[in-house]
Image (tube, helix red, strand yellow):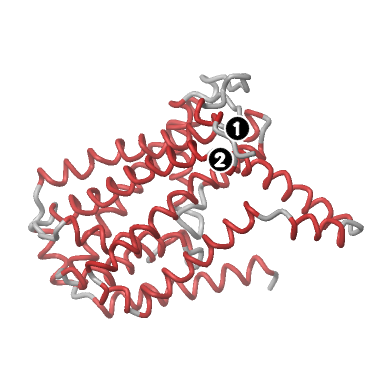
Amino acid sequence: MNKKQNGFAIRLIVTILIVISITRMVKWDEIVAVMMNANITYILLSVAIVPLMVGVSVWKWHVLIKAQGIGVSYWKLYVLYLYGNFFNNFFPTSVGGDIVVWYELGASTNRPTETIASIFMNRFTGLVVVLLGCIIAMVFNFAFFRDFYVAGAMGIAALASGLVVWFISDRKILEGSIRKFGGIRIVKKFLASLRKFQEALNVYRRSYGLVIYVMAISLIYYFMMAINIYLGAKAFNLKPSLLNVIIVLPFIQIVQMLPISLGGVGLKEWSYTVAFPYIGISSSAGLSVALFVRVKVLLIGMSGGFLYPLTKHIWKDGTPGNATVSLNKERIN
């Protein structure tokens, strides 16, 4: 088998193992009973918050892409964001649709490097806020973070974040690699692309005001994610406190980013079944909430898969000279 086939086989095995693990943790009769106890008011509220969450996330992305000097309509980004969510259902991670978004927007603006930098920074600032939430949550429920799986997920996320900060702030190793391996044609081309990507990221590093602004939007989005899960639980007449949802949210979000299963299948569900018992809700009830959230994600993705191909030619992209946000004027010498 080639590498692609090997990767598929490994993810298939992991997916099967995750599903088996979930089935061993839950009681299906309890799941049926929980779902039969659904509350239509909270179901509607839970569905209604999703477009608002998308709007906040796109707001942050719009700020980041304007900082690169790329003029793109907010509403085009909104529909493109939904389109990316459609493909998230088929990629081996909850952020896999970003590849499709990058291809579409990078091609239409002819600024692929700056586009991927904005998408990357959108995800990275969200991860940083999740880790900050993790630190705060440890004060209220340290026992949860002593769990092997939880500690492992948090450790991986913290390590990844540290590597990103290092990459953005230190250019010496990249420049040294270019000098040392620049004679190899393929490596030279890759390192040159990596340098352009690093330079695009430096737009954000040079603006404290921009980063603070974006982090503030990320905090708003983080709180809305917690409300989303809280309403999902209330939809089945479960009674978690919002604080407890905030405590388990970092683990749930980080697990969904791991590229280890087919289409991310099972990761969301597994994270709920592991996390919810720590806040006084059974694994079976947690899986019920996860399945409900999964349905909402599928619906929002389907809307993007339908809308973007119909509307992609409506907006014209540009790179106006005044597109950079005013916050970007705060520079580091």
User: In the rendering, at what x and y percent does residue 187 appear?
Assistant: 82, 58
How far separated are the C-alphas under marks 1 and 2? Answer: 8 Å
Is 257 situated left or right of 110 in this image?
left
Could you tell me which secondary element the residue under label 2 belongs to?
A: helix
In the rendered image, which quarter contains the N terminus?
bottom right
Could you tell me which secondary element the residue under label 1 belongs to?
A: loop
Q: Nearer the viewer, residue 226 or 11?
A: 226
Above or below for 46 versus 255: above
Q: In the image, what residue occupies the spot 51% across and 25% down?
A: 326
Is 321 situated left or right of 56 in this image?
right
Amino acid type of the residue that numbered disc 1 sits on in the rendered structure: Gln
Mark 2 burial class by Cα count in 10 Å: few <14, some 14-19, many 20+: many
Amino acid type of the residue that numbered disc 2 sits on in the rendered structure: Ser
Is 90 situated left or right of 107 in this image?
left
Residue for badge 1: 68
Above or below for 196 versus 254: above
Q: Nearer the viewer, residue 281 or 156?
A: 156
Is 70 situated left or right of 266 in this image?
right
- Are the residues at dot 1 and dot 2 in contact (C-beta closer than 8 Å)? yes
Q: In the image, what residue occupies the spot 26% across and 67% down?
A: 139
Q: In the image, what residue occupies the spot 54% across and 62% down?
A: 162
Residue for badge 2: 118
Mark closer to the chain start, 1 or 2: 1
User: In the rendering, at what x and y percent does residue 256 appear?
Assistant: 41, 61
Mark 1 burial class by Cα count in 10 Å: few <14, some 14-19, many 20+: many
Q: In the image, what residue occupies the spot 79% across and 48% down?
A: 192
User: In the rendering, at what x and y percent does residue 83 appear?
Assistant: 46, 39
In the rendered image, which quarter contains the C terminus?
top right
Tag of residue 198 = none
Above or below for 102 versus 172: above
